Amino acid sequence: MSTATLDTSDIDQYLGKVMDFSPLRETIAPNDIRRWVHAMHYANLLHFDPDYAAASRWGGLVAPQSFAIATDDGHGAAPACVGCIPNSHLLFAGDEWWFYGPRIKPGDMIRNERIPFDYAVKETGFGPTAFQRGDNNYYNQDGDAIAKQRSTSLRYNAHAGGASVNEADFNDSDWSDEEMADVEKRVFSWVQMMHDLGHQERWWDDVNVGDQLPERVFGPHSLASFATEWRAYIVNTWGSMNLRKQDLEGLGFTKEMAGYENDPDMMKVNPFLTDGAYYGPSRGHLFPKFARRIGMPRGYGYGASMGSWVTDFLSGWAGEHGMVVHSTANYRGPALTGDITIQSAEVTEKSVDAEGRHLVHVKHLMTNQRGVKMCLGTAEIALPKKAG
């Protein structure tokens, strides 16, 4: 049993209170949306091809449901990591999403109302760990509620991270040419499913309990693919937001890891120091040396991206006439360089809710090529019902 302690007392003063946020400086542009789906491996023509989008029910380019998080300055994690926990590290641990219907389109101005929700301390492999939750409420310029995201972070003593790393996991997986050819076929199989559905409806009536959704595969991941993901979050381009001032050391990050990520004052002096991909808490994703200091064996993907992969997987299957209305995603392991991601889901129930929506309930799973669980959860997807 660990004898370490975790001082979470400072968190209490923030719970239930609206936080500051960093507003966008410009409206959403078509290329913001295209950059996002490219980075998220989501080859849905609806979100990047103008002719295809014009022929859709939307009449033009529209963002995927996962895009809301790209408009936030903290990957949705900010309300789940307020308060000082001295000498601590943080990992993103999961999301719960509610989607309300309005879609983000070019020309929209998105804002996020953020409210810290709660926390609990439990024993994990890192020792005492705070499971901290916070809400992100996304709205457009007309005040329409787009989505609510309840994010969860893990916060633990800094010394525990490096102690948990297994040196046997330092090297990327090796793939033969034959194996890569098979991976590429599996990757395209899911893209072909979206092409085959096209602008047609996926009918609620035709879905049965026990059905398996088509497998989605992408990767292998690399430092280059993770860097591409990082750049797709709007805040990670210099000058894209009116950044709020943050004190990362004040949140408990060690001085070495805190740096000047998203510091609006330093950005005007030396913007290189403000980019978390190179300095600060986020550099562990792209630099194995720093990944190992927080408990990861090598470069690893972003939790917010993993949650977006879940939403894209489900909404890509639902088609343009369907919508993910609620989902949970509990992260169990990272996407590491050299690994592929495999997504699957099973239909567990069908229902009609109080609003008259016809829902398909699924349980979903994300693993790597070795069967290691990366993410699991449940979701409800609204589909159209045939007339009569």
Image (tube, rainbow, N blue to C red):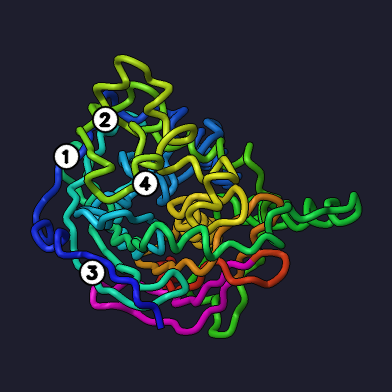
Question: Mark 4 belongs to which amino acid?
Answer: His
Q: Which residues are magenta?
A: 345-367
Q: Position of residue 338 (x, y in %)?
A: 71, 51
- Label 3: how many Cα within 10 Å (few below 14, some 14–19, many 20+): many
Residue 245 visible in the displayed image:
yes
Q: Which disc is residue 119 wearing? A: 3
Q: Which residue is more in the foreground, 18 or 272?
A: 272
- Residue at the image point whose x is 23% and y is 39% from the top: 247
- Residue at the image point whose x is 41% and y is 26% from the top: 237
Numbered disc 4: secondary structure: loop
Numbered disc 2: secondary structure: loop
- Residue at the image point whose x is 50% and y is 62% from the top: 314
- Label 1: how many Cα within 10 Å (few below 14, some 14–19, many 20+): few
- Whether residue 186 is in magenta: the answer is no
What residue would you read off at disc 2?
24
> Of discs 2 and 3, which sits in the foreground?
3
Asked if the residue under mark 3 is in contact with the one under mark 1, i.e. CB atoms within 8 Å, the reply is no
What residue would you read off at disc 1?
142
What's the CA distance linking mark 3 and mark 4? 19 Å
Q: Which residue is more in the foreground, 252 or 325?
A: 252
Numbered disc 3: secondary structure: strand
Q: Which disc is residue 256 wearing? A: none
Question: Mark 1 belongs to which amino acid?
Answer: Asp
Numbered disc 1: secondary structure: loop
